[in-house]
Each structure stands twice: as C-alpha cells, then as structure tokens.
Image (spheres, helix red, strand yellow):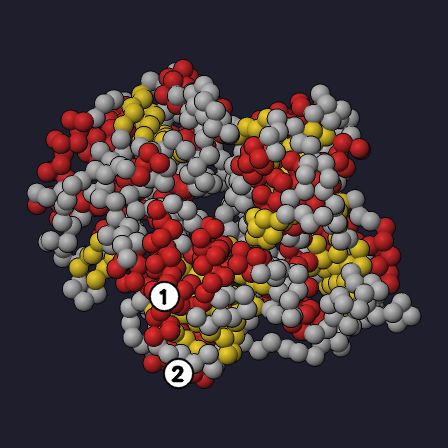
Amino acid sequence: MKVPAEVMVGNFAIARGLVEAGLELAAAYPGTPSSEILPGIVEFNKREKGNIHTEWSTNERCAMEVAFGAALAGKKAVCIMKQVGLNVAFPPLMRGRGKVLEGALVIVSCDDPGPQSSQTEQDTRLLCTLFNIPVFDPASPREAADIAYYALAYSFQRKTPVIIRSTHRVSHAREAVELFPPGTRQVVLSSGVMGQGSKKSAIRNPQSAIRAKLGIITSGMSHSITMDVISELGIGDQISLYKVVRVFPLEKQLIDFVESVDRVLIVEETDATLEMQIGRGNKVFGRINGYVPGAGELTYDVVRSVVERIAKETGIGKKVFVPDSRIEEALQGVTVSPRPPKLCAGCPHRASFHAMSYAYPEAVFPGDIGCYTLGIAQGAVDTCIDMGGGVTLAAGFYDTFSQDNNVVPIIASVGDSTFFHACLPPLYDAIEKRKRFILVIMDNSTTAMTGMQPTPQSGITADGTPTNSLKIEDVVRGLGIEFLRVLDPYDMPLMLNTLKEAQTYLEKKGNTPAVIIARRVCLLTGKGKSQQFLESIDLEEDCTGCKTCITRFGCPALLFDEENKKVKIDDALCIKCGICLYVCPRTEKGKGLSKLRGKRTAKQKT
Amino acid sequence: MKKNGLKLEMVCAGVGGRGVLLASTILIETAVRAGYHAMASDEYGMSQRGGSVVSLVKIGTSQSPLIGRENADILLAFEESEFYRNLVFLRKGGMAIVNTSKDMLPDNITTLLAERNNKCFLISADDIAKEKGMMQASNMAILGFFSYFRIGPYTFEAILDTLRERTKGKFLEKNVDVFQTGYKKAKDKGIAL
C-alpha cells in the first residue's frame, strides 16, 4: 500500500512522529527554532481526532515539570524548547532523569548553530553526555519523524527520559514526509557504516581487506551536508563513513569503526560531543585540533573546505574548489541595500524605544530577549543576557551607582511573554530591596518573535480554546509596585512625560521600581493589522535631508532619496503610525509633536 | 524517487513579507508531485518583515537542502539587492531571473555574468503585480517567467497545478493572472530554449 506523503518542515515531522507514536501530552515554551512543533502536534491531533493535551507553558521549566508529572503517572509525554530553554529546565532535568517513568518522556531541544536566533550556541548533546541521558540527532525532516516515533517508544520501554536534539537546519528544512496511520510507522534509522555492500550508494566503502585511509563520522544535518560534499568532490569510493543517530550512549560499533580506518574526520554540530567521547588523540581530525572550526555553523562551504583539506592531506583528494574572485570584484561597484534585522514598520516597540532614549539618552538600558532586543539599534538596549535578566541586571546597576553615590537613570525593557516567563522573582526581589529603576513592560499581547504564540495574558490555550487571563497590571500591583502606569506607546508625549514622572518618583526616594506598561497590540496579529494612527501627514514636505529619522529611528519604511536628498516613505511598508514625526528635528515648527499633542493624550486612558 | 539522475539546485532570494517562501513552497511541491525527491531550507533571520529571506531548494539525489558557493543552477531574485547578495551561489553557466525595473544591470555585473556564461533575465515583476492589483504577487510573475524554460519538472502546467492547490479563495485568480503574465513576458521575448 502506498503511504501518502506531505511536504512539511522538520518541526512538523517531529510532531507527526510523536502523534503517530501515541503521544498523550505535550507542553512547550516557544523559541526559534523549536516553535512549530507544538502547533504541529495540535494540527495532527486534530486530523487524527486524537485526545492529546497540548499547552504553551509559561516557561521551559513549567513545560518539563508538567510533562514529567504526566510521564511519572503513566502518560506518554513530550516537552519542547530551544537549546537555551533547556537551561531553564535544568532543575527537573537533573533530578528527574534518574526517576523510573510509568509512561514515557521525550524532551525535544532544538539547537541553533551559528547562532542565528539565540544569545549563544550550545550543544544539547553535550549536556546529555554529562548527565547520562540518551540523545538522538536527526539528519533530515524525514528522519526526524522516524526518530520522534522511535524515541517515544524507546523512553516507554526503558522507563527513562530521552532527548531529541534537532538543529535549525533540520527543524526548518522542508521535505516530503510519509503520513502513517497512528501506531504503524515503518521506522528506518540509518545508523552505522553507510553504503556497505551497496553499489548504488554514494559511499562505496573499500572492501574490508583494504584499510580505508580516511573514515568520516557524522551526525545530524552535518551528515547530510557531508554526503553532498563527498558526492561533489567525487571521493565516495575512497572513504568509509559512519553515521551516528544516537549520539549518547555511543554504539560499540562506532569504536570498532574508528579502529578500522587510518585516520578519522568527525563532522558534527555544535560542539565536539562525539569527538570527546571517541578520544583517540591525533588519529582524529576535528574541532580539538582545529581542522573543524570551533564555533559557527557548519555550512556547505565550511564542510566542503574541511573535507577537501583533509582529503588532500590523506592523499585521496582529486578535486579542489577554487572560488571565483571575479564575483567579489564585480560586486564591489554595486550598491546593495543593507538589511540588518529590524523591527517592523510601525512596531509599537520602536515608539517605546524612541521615548526611552529621547527622554534619557544618558540612561543605562538593560534589555531582554525577544523582538525588542532589536532596540539596540535605537540606543535603548545596552544588555541582553538571558530571559528576565534585564530586570535583575537593572537591580545590580542600581546598587553599583548608589554605592558610589551616583544617580544614573536606569530604564529596563521586557516583553509581555518574557515578563511572565522569568521576571517575577527578579521583580519582587527588586521591590523587597528597594531597587530604583524604571521597568518598561512592552506588551504587544503576543509572543511575536517566535510566531504569535499566546501569553498567560492572552486567555487562549495552544489549540485556541478560551481560558483564564492574567493581567500584567494585576500581577505588578499585587507585588506592591507603587508607581504603575499603563499607556499606549504611540502616544509619544504621554510616554515621554511618564518616563520623566517615573524618574522623578525614583529620585525622590520612591520605594519600589517604577513600572510602565506600554501596551499596543503587535501589528502582525489580526487585531494589529487594522491599526492606523494618522490620516495623512507629509514627512517629506520640509525635509532637509539630515537623516536623523533614518539613523535614530531606523524604520524600514524610511528610505533616502539620493536624487532629491530627502527622506522618502515606502508606501508599501508604511502603516502611517506617524511616530517618525516625533523623531524629525523639524517637528517643533508645528507639524509633528506640538500639533498632535492634545489630540492623542485626550484619547488616553490610564 | 530519483528520475533520470536530475539534480537541480535553486536559490530563491528576496525580502520578508513578499512571498519568497510561497514561491519556494510551490517549487518543492511541484517537484514532489512529479516524483522527485526534493528538499528546501529557509533562512529568514530575526526580522519579522522587511529582512533578507533566502530559501534554498534542491531536487534530485541530494541529501541536504544546503547549497555551496557557485553551485546553484538557478537563482530567482525577487529583489535586486538580494540578487547581488546571493550571486556567489550561482554556478558557471547557471541561470538567474531578477525582479527589477531596470533594463540593464551595471556594466561590471553584465560583464561578470557573460564571463561566467550565466544567462540572466530581468523582469519588472513588481510592475506586473501592481498592474494586476496585487503587489504581493510579484513572486508569481517570476515563477511564470521561469516556467517558460521547462527545466526539470517546472513546466507552465505543472507549476500552475501546484499554484491552484496551494492558493485559495480570492487570491487565487489574481495569482494565476500574474503568473500567466510572467510566462508571456518570457514568451514575448522569444528566448531560444
């Protein structure tokens, strides 16, 4: 019987494998590149008319503990997070890994080699070797589906938690994945020496009588890339290759393989996890002796240059890739618009950041993790350590300044989802200890950067069912914050006045941090799309071409017209929020700030 | 899954929010429907909108969805700056289609493309899309233009079939209209196949 297949991202493939394997509970906190797995479970559960409980947790620790509880009590559970999210879940992981499960627990942790969307690279597999947790490393979406299916059964049979480590290149790759009826997936895990006895395989291992000069050990997406590179370089008939699926505990055959070749190259992401387990000193080409770069993603070009160099050194290489330098030479004379990561045109965060850096340019700005980390471009984010770290760093900065009798404004920022995720202990700690700083909670009513997941305030669950909603202002008030204002960040005059008011409160020995909730819904949500503030205002009219708006505000809809030496608005991107008018140094002349002041504040409810 | 040993590496490059991922979805699904093994890899960075978006599509015997420098057979650039940014992917003899209102690229680029034996076609996809009243559909004009060349599984009819399956409701007909106009542009140029 032909099994239907569907093109899907790796994260949906993981979801599919878990649902087919009889998953009963899933809990997750969103984080790139893991965020699509839980929605995938919701989707396939719906299609299969299943009864899987799904939830977006407040943070990764909650997700893991909920899943652990279910697994201890006999359910097949999964918790899902990104690599740095796993750090948040350490307490239950460390203690829980030794518990005997009645059910099953799979932990999916998605790594971000590079990193592309994280503070740090981090290899989940390395933690697994340190703490004795089996870990699987899929090389493609299709294999990810099989591994997910296999891992849930593996955990159930062995009564122990297991980890699936994906990377962004697997999680966000797309491939046709077969859809089996639940409980019937034909799992194919290709682990071990590749292509043995097969004439068709790209890798034709030399017969056992001839000892291979070079063996290559691979896992995850690095395996898939290495295979393509070997095919490009045409060295498939001269090397042996061992693909690892379960990175820990190592298979005995892998050690035998290492013994069977003269030298061995290990291609893996993100750290030297296989390499350190294998040992064997100078026999190995890897990260430890510098043959493989110690950091950054193993892209196709990186793997190609590594394999080429080693093939040459071991005397098997034929082909060498020489980049055509004419390309770079020709590109030198071409203007390429830079596209650094930016907040969307009209993003309410940009308005908040402008107010913060305009009101107190000399302030220290502890920032946090989310879209609003991009406030760094507006000079309103100085630090970005970890989720919730902005609040606690602000407290540390306050102590530093006050110890030396300095008064320096401190304005921390955090988003709504991150506030619930990790800011409560830091905030009540700061209240109890009378730390004096301003905290701007940028509430766009969603977890925007990872793709619009609900927050505890949203009042909906992972599958869209209505539920209780926790209001940020109620929580803040409940903790005992004395200075609390809720406002619309588009109301620039009010935003500036409130920041001044908050700083005055702190300087007059206010007893708690001052909290400002800047609330305006994200433009990318359904509600946000229809939001327009201005009817029509001409920014270009008396533009002198000073570019202040472009450099200080950085809105993607502001372009510079080199011909007219004036700023031009890109109508396709502009949403007419009008906030850039406050940035223009010429607004005092009557068109921007002063004209709008009365109009906006009148609308404001606090 | 392997058909006649065909191996095709394609780069779709553009700006967030302008349909790069939909275009690459149509490319991968058209290949899968025709019985090829196909993979794609998307890179969209941290911007939600307006940032560089690159989607790599490989069909045939490849195992990874990633493409090395000077390996891509086809570069579909949905915006001119993104064409330059991704030009290093294009192999000698590869083909590029660029969305631009210009009639010619700068001299040094034209020379480079000629030296490297690249076929490069310019199409004002934005104007076509604007004319049809659907700015977001410029990607379809490029796919339409591309379909004229009938490379691998990518015939006009095959892409149209996928397009009809992927796009629903009121957007479908406009998308199809833009797609057909893109195809006609290539046909009217009388490019020899």
Determine crowd level at label 2: few under 14, some 14-19, many 20+ residues with C-alpha closer than 10 A. Answer: few
Identify the element where label 1 is drawn: helix
Residue A500 on image: x %, y %: 24, 30
Q: Residue, x 61% and y 39% (percent of image)?
A: A15
Q: Can residue A175 be seen? A: yes
Q: Can residue A397 be seen? A: no
Marks 1/2: CA–CA distance: 26 Å
Q: Quadrant of the N terminus of chain B?
A: bottom right
Disc 1: host chain: B
Residue A420 on image: x %, y %: 46, 27
Q: Residue, x 66% and y 78% (percent of image)?
A: A319
Identity, as a three-letter code, of the amino acid under mark 2: Thr
Tell me which numbered mark, 1 or 2, is placed earlier along the sequence.
Answer: 2
Residue A374 on image: x %, y %: 39, 45
Q: Nearer the viewer, residue B144 or B139?
A: B144
When asked about the image quadrant of residue A203, the answer is bottom right
Residue designated by label 1: B182
Residue designated by label 2: B111
Determine crowd level at label 1: few under 14, some 14-19, many 20+ residues with C-alpha closer than 10 A. Answer: many
Vertical side of A523 occupied by A337: above or below: below
Identity, as a three-letter code, of the amino acid under mark 1: Gly
Q: Residue, x 60% and y 76% (percent of image)?
A: A321
Vertical side of A490 occupied by B18: above or below: below
Q: Single out the residue that lies furthest toward the right.
A: A209
